[in-house]
Image (cartoon, grey):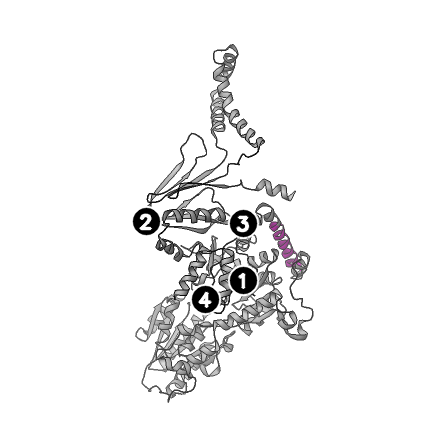
Amino acid sequence: MPYNIAMVSDNFYPQPGGVESHIYQLSSKLINRGHKVIVITHAFKGRKGVRYLTNGLKVYYVPFWTVYRETTFPTVFSFFPIFRNIVIREQIEIVHGHASLSNLCNEAILHARTMGLFTVFTDHSLFGFADAGSILTNKLLKFTLSDVDHVICVSHTCKENCVLRASLDPLMVSVIPNAVVAENFRPLSHDSVHTRRNNAPGPPQPLGPNETITIVAIMRLFYNKGVDLLIAAIPRVLAAHPNVRFIIAGTGPKAIDMEQMIERNVLQDRILLLGAVRHEEVRDVMVQGHIFLNPSLTEAFGTVIVEAASCGLYVVCTRVGGVPEVLPNHMTEFAAPEEDDIVAATGRAIAKLREGKIRTDLFHGQVKQMYSWTDVAERTERVYDGVVGAVGSEDFYGGDAARGHPDVRSFALIDRLKRYYGCGIWAGKLFCLCAVVDYLLFIILEIFAPRSRIDICRNWPKKILEGEKVNTTRIAEASDGMPRRRDRRRRGSE
Amino acid sequence: MVAALQRLSAPPVQTLHTLQPTPATVSYTVSTRPEATTLTAKLRFYAGIALRILPAVALAWTLGDARAEEILVLVSRLPWRYLAPASLCAVYLALRRGYAEESLLVLRGLGLQTSTASSIYLRTPTTRFIPTTSVQDIFIHEAFKGFEIRFYLAVVVKGEEDVVVVFPRLLPRRGILEEVWRGSRRCLWEDAGGAKKKGEEKGRESA
């Protein structure tokens, strides 16, 4: 059963990042499976309005005021009129929010529930519990997630974190990992023969003792990516291993520290700083190296590690968050997130590579089998089925555990208020107030901007598969469709 | 009560009038003028016109009369700072157009002309003529306007950065726009299939 899905997040292209590519890949795969998907995000510099991407993915860049790192200013209700308009004109059934720090996503989930739509939320990041900022964010997350139909997390660690932060029922949370487009991350020595074979294609070629090993690190240079650890570890690694050099790509506030480290230790000839690298160029940087070093302090999934392994790099990473779940043991060397351990782990990795124990040439095929976006889309679709009630709760949650779970969560205001009320002594009442105001706003909008005054959008012409051809063309003829008929003719000539 | 509020807040109804004297010429007019079909509506329409004209006619008629002199004396005794705005207001009310009207005229081989009627009767409409040679494409797209998203019909003009929006003030609904879009494309490039295909590739208005 095809659904109309709206992906809502502050993070979307043209801004680069993991969440952005997740939304894009998931959406295009869902479209391939016959659903209709739109993306709602805020306007970026030079990009505002309605746009179409490949495959008919429609993106609404809503003009909004951004405050910090491309996040919109949190006003609880201001997004409602425009959101309602979009949802009605696109006939949306499921609202899928991404990234917990995205204010647009939080608002959209609240409004969608008020409008009686199904909601799914995907969490992409881990948060602490101790500092003031985290407490505030967690409270906000609890507010949104106390009335969401289902939550998707990208790793089991992320799920645990999310369940604790938002006091969720663990049954309501599914784990669907990210994926990579393996075709975009091929190793340098890659030819078509290797893709089909997973067993050893020949004897391993060990590196000579004097051959230079290149270590690649690609990250945005922010504190949470572990740049400080990297800065501390690099001089020690280089001192201990003579035939090693580093390539570091990415920019951020810590770039200055990095440059200072290089100058203080006079390492200009052994460290290459590349600055900002676009996502499609990441592969070209990766294939220049042998080892990928990822010193991140917190990471929910770590797509970049998978990308590196897919490029045939041996991965050295910190054992934080969801990272240990991501790759099998033979592809990675783990370290605790501290300077000494990272230096030691890098040393071990260099030694293993020199001995020729690691078959990095096989990594690409293995990663390709483990991760695919089609699989992610299939699993997400199953979540949608469960949320909508197409799959009964018994099936969806599994046997006994489903007891007490209705097939579809009630949309009645009183039930929603009950859920919000349990959020805390003060917060519960505040959240209830917000929900009630939101509901009143909804009624006012229904009076002053009734649905009859909103035009329904036409859908993007669907790709016609060979099997369905006869069936679909008849429908196209029955409705109307000057353009559609032409479309078919063009396809026929191919 | 809800229905009453909805009706009060509703924008005026827009109607599309199509005039096609020859296959190569077509004019689309979108207007918010209520169509006078019933007798009462017609009477009300003429009464409105009479109300605007009659005072002036009556004043002119009675010029030189004793009673008219009295009125004129009374008026001239008023200080100008009340008199000037009041008369301006009266002129504005008499000349105000109670509806909005915008149109698109398409002439094959010549070009197309958009026009927006001004809100006052005596002023000429704002028009913009685009010759066929510089019309690159006509398409329907969506944009944010206030708290909603509206469809608009736009013409891409060669050598200009911005598109020309047809019906910029009224921004009619999708149904009207699609009819105008189909009709004007048919009129401009009736047998030129290539031109149509070019529009399709933009993918803006394919069903």
Q: Which mark is residue A97?
A: 1
What residue sits right under mark 2 in the picture?
Answer: B158
Q: What stretch is highlighted in magenta?
A: A425-442
Where, by quadrant of the figure, is residue A491 drawn? bottom left
* Labels 3 and 2 positioned on one and the same chain: no
Q: Where is residue A372 in the image (x, y as percent from the top left)?
A: 47, 74
Where, by quadrant of the figure, is residue A93 drawn? bottom right
Of tags 2 and 4, which is closer to the observer?
2
What's the distance in space between the residues labelled 2 and 4, CA to CA? 36 Å
Residue A431 drawn in magenta: yes
* Labels 3 and 1 positioned on one and the same chain: yes
Is label 4 in contact with label 1 (beta carbons under 8 Å)?
A: no
Please give the chain letter of the residue carrying mark 2: B
Q: Which of A427 and A50 is in front in this view?
A: A50
Of the two numbered discs 4 and 1 on the same chain, state the one appearing first in sequence.
4
Q: Is the magenta stretch mostly helix, strand or loop?
A: helix
Please give the chain letter of the residue carrying mark 4: A
What residue sits right under mark 3 in the picture?
Answer: A454
Residue type at numbered disc 1: Gly
Q: Is residue A490 visible?
A: yes
Assess disc 3: are there few (<14), some (14-19) or many (≥20) residues with their C-alpha within 10 Å of its C-alpha. some
What's the distance in space between the residues labelled 4 and 1, CA to CA? 14 Å
Is label 3 in contact with label 2 (beta carbons under 8 Å)?
A: no
Q: Is mark 1 on a helix, strand or loop?
A: strand
Left of B16 or right of it: where is A273?
left
Of tags 3 and 1, which is closer to the observer?
3
Residue type at numbered disc 4: Ser
